[in-house]
């Protein structure tokens, strides 16, 4: 089968997501076939979005350096937007409870 369109020079956010989704489907098909050959249940990759990488990195930056650093690294004008991307550090609450009681 020949492609109907010429490839673009770069990915868009939508084409990047499509490429990820197709790769997950392809990998899961291979995993299912391999598991069937071995007579075991397949361990499938979950569906995921590229934006999860942004969320993970933002959470890590916030945990290590604080909310303002997360805001700056993501390029947000307001910290409330960053709070949507960067999850709170629950380990901080555990440490406070451990020290204070």
Image: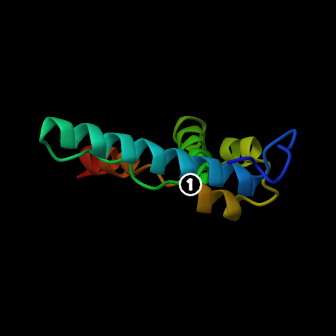
Q: Is residue 39 left or right of residue 89?
A: left
**Circle 1 sits on which residue?**
49
Which residue occupies 55% across, 50% down? 22
Percent x, y of residue 77: 82, 57
Question: 57 or 6, which lies in front?
Answer: 6
Question: Taking 84 as reference, is 93 above or below it?
Answer: above
Q: Residues within 10 Å of mark 1 (few under 14, many from 20)?
A: few
| Front residue of 57 and 51 | 51
The answer to which of 44 and 2 lies nearer the viewer is 2
Q: Quadrant of residue 37?
A: top left
Which residue is drawn at the image coordinates 32% and 41% (left, top)? 31
Quarter-of-image position of residue 53: top right
Residue lying furthest left in this view? Answer: 39
Secondary structure at badge 1 equals loop
Q: Please name the residue shown 68% across and 64% down the image.
A: 80
Outermost residue on the front side: it is 1
Point out residue 33 in the picture as x, y percentages from the top left corner.
Answer: 29, 42
Query: Where is residue 20 shown, x and y percent of the image?
Result: 58, 47
The residue positioned 64% from the left and 54% from the top of the image is 18
From the viewer's perspective, tell me whether residue 1 is left or right of residue 89.
right
């Amino acid at each position: 089968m020949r492609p109907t369109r010429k490839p673009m020079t770069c990915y868009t956010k939508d084409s990047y997501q499509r490429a990820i989704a197709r790769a997950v489907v392809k990998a899961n098909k291979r995993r299912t076939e391999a598991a069937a050959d071995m007579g075991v249940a397949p361990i499938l990759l979950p569906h995921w979005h590229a934006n999860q990488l942004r969320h993970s990195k933002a959470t890590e930056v916030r945990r290590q350096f604080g909310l303002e650093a997360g805001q700056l690294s993501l390029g947000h004008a307001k910290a409330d937007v960053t709070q949507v991307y960067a999850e709170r550090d629950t380990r901080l609450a555990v440490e406070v409870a451990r020290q204070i009681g």
